[in-house]
Each structure stands twice: as structure tokens, then as C-alpha cells.
Image (tube, coloured by chain):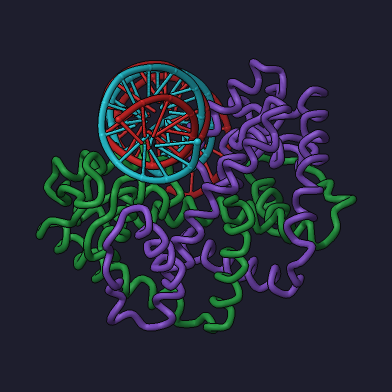
Chain colours: A green, B purple, C cyan, D red
Amino acid sequence: MDALVARVGAVRAVAPSAGAASTVGHSPKRMLFLDLVLSVFRLNGLLVAEGDAMTEDLGLTSARWKVIGVVALSTAGLTVPGIARVLGQSRQAVQRITDVMAQDGLITYEPNPKHKRSVLVLLTDEGKSAYHALREVQDPWAIRNTEDIPIEELETSLRLVRRLIQRLDK
Amino acid sequence: MDALVARVGAVRAVAPSAGAASTVGHSPKRMLFLDLVLSVFRLNGLLVAEGDAMTEDLGLTSARWKVIGVVALSTAGLTVPGIARVLGQSRQAVQRITDVMAQDGLITYEPNPKHKRSVLVLLTDEGKSAYHALREVQDPWAIRNTEDIPIEELETSLRLVRRLIQRLDK
DNA sequence: CCGATGATGACAGCATGCTGACATCATCAA
DNA sequence: TTGATGATGTCAGCATGCTGTCATCATCGG
């Protein structure tokens, strides 16, 4: 909770006269966890903004490169609800994005041999080059942001985040 | 990236015949980082959903208890742009939330001795009891989700997340 | 004191997510 | 075969975030 208190404190200079924070009664673990939750909110917003800024030249948005990334990882296409399950979003939200992306020529809907109604989403050539362009800005960005971070910390954090996901996703 | 590939793989059972994922060319660190980014997206969505479900009996939403939590940590109130800076959101987004919360009687706008136009946001008695009710569900939830997680992992993850925030927030 | 600069309030438009609801198609067990 | 159950497509409504814009107020340097 220290970071939040610090941020509130920092704001005092602008919006003045805030007193001491009332964090009495919080155990250290609880405070750590709640701070982590708030930090995840914050990081999520920053990552979306960063991703949008990084890919706006490619005509992409955060919602779009999430879909492109998932589809690119499958060689034979995914259904719209399938993409939604991977991303943990509603199928309606994904459907709306893919419909626009299909109009823009980034993806195509192909017949699904295993399912008559639920078509498969595939990348068009344009979509593939968008993915490659995405990789070309995403990879240096990933390297830049991890070069001074020990791999063990990345592994620990990822494991923790995954554990939380698994716990909340049932 | 393993988790994403695994998720795509798991979806194969539903939306069939996806081949091997093409993760060639990714260094381990890059893959870890990109997987962490995607996992943060996922966790963010789950945390918002969980928070909404947890507080719907209190008439709160995720956007509202974020505001309540921040205001409760200051004893003399914060301005709307100040809350926005703490949460890392736009002042317009916060303004809209606080306007509705003021109508609902959770907060009040009080004159700011340091600034004639920018009023201070304070919790009403109703807002304070909402915060206490929030704490009563939030604290057990935090304990439940951390009891089997070593405090060192929480600290490492929080430190990493904060470092990323600091790097992206400039 | 005054003008430049920045912060704020207020409104508009848009993107993205959610849920609900309903019809239709797929699948499986009786 | 048939009926129940689940998955999907589709449309609607709503919540929440962002940016842009403009007028107004605060603050500070000249």
C-alpha cells in the first residue's frame, strides 16, 4: 500500500492538505496484495496506451493486435468464441472487433469443416504483414523493457499472475 | 508464451485443427515478457469482474470503489484531477464517476481553500460506511488469495510491476 | 500590474468491454 | 429418431475508458 500512499502524498502538492493515510489494521500481506491489485490496474492501462501508441502507424489498436496475435499463433484458424476464450473476453466483444477487421481486410472468415455455423478466423496476407510489422515493433520493445530485469523475477511474477488468473477464472 | 500456446491448444478441442504455434525467433526473455503482458490483460479483466461481483451488494462498481479507496486514504479530500493522477486515468473519466457518486450521496464536493475552482472530493457518512463495507469483503478476499503465496513472491512481483509502471509512465 | 502558461470544468465523440435476450444450429442421450 | 441441452450468431443497451475542444480560472515571471 506504500506506493498508493506515496502517490496520494505526491498529489498533495497539487491538491493540498491531505493528512496521514489510514492503513491501520492491514496486515503486510494484505497490503502487498491490494497494492499489487491496484498496480495491475495501473499497468494494464499503461500497457494498452503504450500498445496503442506503438501500433497506431500500423492502423492497429490494442483490441486488434490482441486478436491478431492469437490468430497468428494458430495455423488453422480459430472460431470467434474460441478467440474470446483465449483472451478471456466475451464472444460478442470479439465478434465486433473481428467484423470490423474483416471489413478492413485483415482477416477472413473461412468455412469450418467441423462446424457449419461457426466459421474460422484466418489472417489475410494483409493481416500477416500487419502481424510481422507488429512483431517488429513489439520485440524490440519487449527487449528494451526486460534487459535490466533478471529472468528469475520475470518467471516469479508470471507464475504469480498465472496463479491468480487460474484462481479467479473458475 | 507457453501459457498462451496452451490456451490456444486447449481451444483446439472446441475449435479444432490448429497446428503448432509459431514462436520461432523469440528469445526466452521476450517470450516471458510478452506472456506476462498478456497475462496482465487477462488478470485485469478478471480482477475487475471479481471486484464488481464482490461489491455489487454494496451498490458499488469497480470504477466506484477505486475512487472510494483513493479518497478514503486522504483525510482532507482530493481534487478530481488529483484522483485521476493517482489512478492514472483521465480527469474526465473520474469526473463522470464522481458526479454520479455525488448524486448518489457517496461523496460531496467541498470548497478547496487552496483553489477556488477545483473543489475537494470527500466521503459522506454513506460513503464512509460503503468504504468500511468494502473493506469487510476486500480484506478476507485478499487474505484468501495470498495465504498460500510466499510474501517474497508478492514483493518481487509488486516490485517488477512498479518498475514497469514507472518506466511506462513518463 | 499584466500577459503567458498551465490547470480545470464541461461537453462531445468514439472505442471497447459487459450483460441480456432471442433464434438457430450442434450434439448427445434416451 | 427425437427431445433436451449447450454453443453460436445477432442485436440492443449500458458502463467505462480515451481524446479533442473550448472557455475560464490560477499562477508566475517580466
Residue at point 51%, 59% (across, down): B40
Residue at point 76%, 49% (across, down): B141
Q: Position of residue B131 (x, y in %)?
A: 78, 34
Count every numbered label the image shows and give the total.
0
Residue at point 62%, 32% (across, down): B61
**Foreground pick, B128 / A104:** A104
Q: Position of residue A60 (x, y in %)?
A: 24, 51
Report the side of B122 relative to C18 (left or right): right
Report the side of B136 relative to A144 (left or right): right
In the figure, residue A139 lies in which quadrant? bottom left
Q: Is residue B66 above or below residue A146?
A: above
**Foreground pick, B19 / C18:** B19
In the figure, residue A77 lies in which quadrant? bottom left
The quarter of the rendered structure image containing the N terminus of chain B is: bottom left
- Looking at this view, name the residue that lies furthest to the right: A25
Q: Position of residue B23 (x, y in %)?
A: 31, 76
**Foreground pick, B90 / B139:** B139
Residue at point 48%, 50% (across, down): A45
Q: Is residue B77 above or below residue A27?
A: above
Q: Is residue C23 above or below residue D20?
A: above
Q: Position of residue A136 (x, y in %)?
A: 24, 71
Report the side of A121 relative to C6 (left or right): left
